[in-house]
Image (spheres, rainbow, N blue to C red):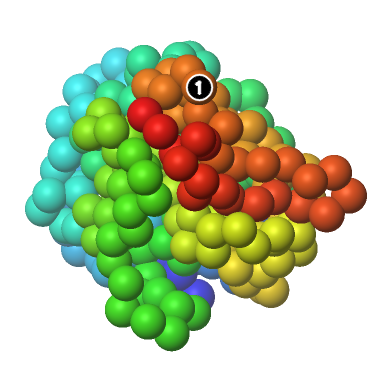
Amino acid sequence: MSKILLIEPDRHLMTAMQEVLLLDGHESLRHVSPETAMTDLARQDVDLVVLELRQRSIDAVSVIERVTNSYGVPVVVLSTTASATEESMMLRLGADDYLAKPFSMRVFGARIAAALRSAAPNHRDADDVTVIQRGALRLDRLRHEARWDGKEVALTATEFNVLWIIAQRPGQVLSRANILDLAYGGDVFVTDRSIDSQIKRIRRKLREVAPGFTAIETLYGLGYRFTDSPEDMAA
């Protein structure tokens, strides 16, 4: 069982999130303000913090920095602004995921499970590879860093994990079920459509720095394939 600290001023949303976490076997600590939450964080062993970004009483950015730097606890940011700029900034500050409101409770539960899994030691990989270089693409798993031709690509923890899985197996066709199993494991309910959404976001973010990016190929009815051919991998 994981212990999750919720910081959310909307009490109705707080209750809904707490119910989802309970169904998934997690314990949650409720707080409407970051001030009281920080006191709880200092007293208890917490596995994950969920923080609503638009806090009026305190600088939420300073909370993220404090949680990640002082306590080493992963953070999932909730925001009323679906902003790519804001998302990129939060990820650079150390947030593990960014979830724009409104969101479904099913998606919330899946994102929490993915963030917890990404923060935990990875036992699924048989090797000790921590860096993947595929042409202009460089992935550093320890630093959670994705770069294309030296330019940073701000990915969430789940997006990074999905891209790592595909890039680790160049030329191999991976079905959605394969990616689901490798990215999430068998203990989380996630639909095939969530993988399609992840791939779509990964492509969009890579094309922001590399407009001609085509290295992730869709094979309709089969799944996805990462190609490292010179034509597709050129910056």
Q: Is residue 57 left or right of residue 178?
A: left
Q: Residue furthest right?
A: 221
Number of numbered discs: 1
Q: Is residue 161 visible?
A: no
Q: Position of residue 124 (x, y in %)?
A: 49, 79
Q: Is residue 23 left or right of residue 42?
A: right
Residue nearest the observer in this picture, 205 or 97: 205
- The vertical placement of 8 against 165, above or below, is above
The residue labelled by disc 1 is 212
User: Can you name the residue that lies furthest to the front here?
Assistant: 230
Q: Is residue 33 left or right of residue 101?
A: left
Q: Residue at x 70, y 66 (%)?
A: 178
Residue found farthest to the left: 70
Residue pictured at 40% horizontal, 33% vertical: 234
Query: Is 113 situated above or below 52?
Result: below
- Find residue 147 and report its image quarter: top left
> Does residue 23 sit above or below 125 in this rendering?
above
Residue toward you, 110 or 124: 124
- Left or right: residue 108 versus residue 86 is right
Q: Quadrant of the C terminus?
A: top left
SS of the residue under disc 1: loop
Residue at point 23%, 53% (across, down): 143
Measuring 51% from the left and 46% from the top, which residue is drawn there? 229
In this view, the residue in front, 165 or 79, is 165
Q: Residues within 10 Å of mark 1 (few under 14, many from 20)?
A: few
Residue 185: x percent and y percent? 62, 71
Amino acid type, mark 1: Gly
* Quarter location, residue 172: bottom right
- Where does the image place residue 48, in percent across and percent down from the top left? 37, 56
Q: Is residue 187 visible?
A: yes
